[in-house]
Image: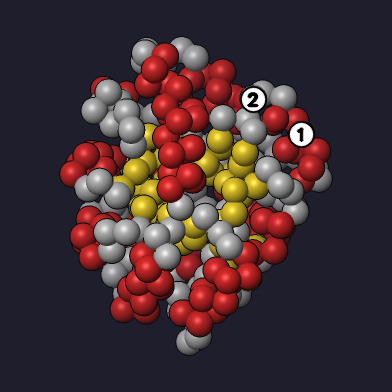
């Protein structure tokens, strides 16, 4: 299995959340333990998860902090994704250097926590580079548990799935993953994933028992477009996998969600 949405090391992730950390843990009702990365991956490998998409994030401009790209070199089980702050004046050049240095499978962008509209001209320059390299991009979509209930400048509108329909048309070599299936605009995200061959949905950030029924009702049509992701440490993979056993889907579709769809994406990149 491949967990396509994983935050680690935990200490660096909590440091990045800063003032949003405690409210976010409360929002997710999470129990977060600070452990070493190797120990964490060893533990989850015992559940059959062999590879982990660890997602750095660069929010230097908006929040004044980042999880650096270097974390992806800490373990061979990590599927390499990097991040760049689109609002930096030299973001395009930094991305080109990082692609050359890290040879990533993809890029993580979080419009809400990085403070940019998905169709911002600066972001479009970043997408063009990603598209030219045929890489994957994981976009946070939907609401944000980070910042929930706290005064901030985080705009939920930046997570509306509909903006990514335009992006999918303009950049057709770029594989787009709409993380968290865009809730509460889930049907919007489903429509785009069904319509655009380069758009996928990850199921992270939600325990399966709470994932909207509309996802499972469309799972057969979306069988090649859904990806298992936990959102560790906010959702623990063992809980996700245990609850997923009770979801009424054929084993063939479950195998695609847990493994085969991710393998194909990673292999193509």
Q: Label 2 crowding class (10 Å Cα cut-off): few <14, some 14-19, many 20+?
A: few
Q: In front here: 79 or 204? A: 79
* 219 lies left or right of 90: left
- Relative to 1, residue 112 above or below: below
Residue at x 25% of width, y 39% of height: 190
Q: Can you identify the residue that label 2 sits on?
A: 48
Question: Dot 1: within a 10 Å radius of its alpha carbon, few (fewer than 14), some, or many (20 or more) residues?
Answer: few
Spot the residue most to the bottom: 89
SS at circle 1? helix
On screen, 75 above or below 44?
A: below
Residue 115 x, y percent position in the rendering: 44, 70
Q: Position of residue 18 (x, y in %)?
A: 66, 61
Residue 31: numbered disc? none
**Residue 14 image position (x, y, % from top left):** 68, 54
Identify the residue at horizontal 37%, vertical 34% (top origin). 226
Residue appearing at x 43%, y 21% in the figure: 254
Earlier residue among tags 2 and 1: 1
Query: Considering depth in this image, is 168 or 182 the residue closer to the camera?
Result: 168
Q: Which residue is mark 1?
A: 42
Report the coloring of the rendering.
Answer: secondary structure
């Amino acid at each position: 299995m491949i967990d396509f949405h994983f935050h680690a090391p935990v200490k660096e992730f909590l440091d990045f959340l800063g003032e949003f950390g405690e409210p976010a843990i409360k929002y997710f009702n999470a129990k977060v333990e600070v452990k070493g990365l190797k120990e964490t991956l060893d533990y989850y490998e015992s559940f059959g998860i062999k590879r982990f998409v660890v997602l750095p994030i660069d929010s230097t401009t908006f929040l004044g902090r980042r999880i650096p790209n270097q974390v992806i070199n800490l373990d061979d089980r990590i599927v390499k994704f990097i991040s760049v702050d689109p609002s930096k004046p030299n973001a395009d050049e930094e991305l080109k250097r990082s692609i050359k240095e890290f040879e990533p499978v993809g890029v993580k962008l979080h419009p809400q926590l990085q403070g940019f509209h998905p169709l911002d001209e600066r972001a479009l320059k970043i997408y063009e580079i990603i598209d030219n390299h045929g890489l994957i991009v994981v976009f946070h979509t939907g609401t944000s548990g980070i910042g929930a209930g706290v005064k901030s400048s985080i705009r939920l509108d930046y997570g509306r799935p509909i903006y990514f329909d335009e992006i999918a048309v303009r950049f057709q070599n770029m594989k787009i993953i709409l993380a968290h299936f865009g809730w509460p605009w889930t049907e919007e995200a489903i429509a785009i994933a069904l319509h655009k061959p380069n758009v996928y949905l990850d199921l992270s950030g939600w325990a399966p028992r709470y994932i909207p029924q509309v996802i499972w009702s469309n799972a057969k049509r979306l069988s090649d477009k859904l990806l298992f992701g936990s959102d560790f440490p906010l959702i623990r993979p063992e809980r996700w996998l245990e609850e997923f056993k009770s979801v009424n889907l054929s084993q063939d579709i479950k195998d695609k969600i847990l493994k085969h769809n991710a393998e194909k994406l990673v292999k193509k990149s």
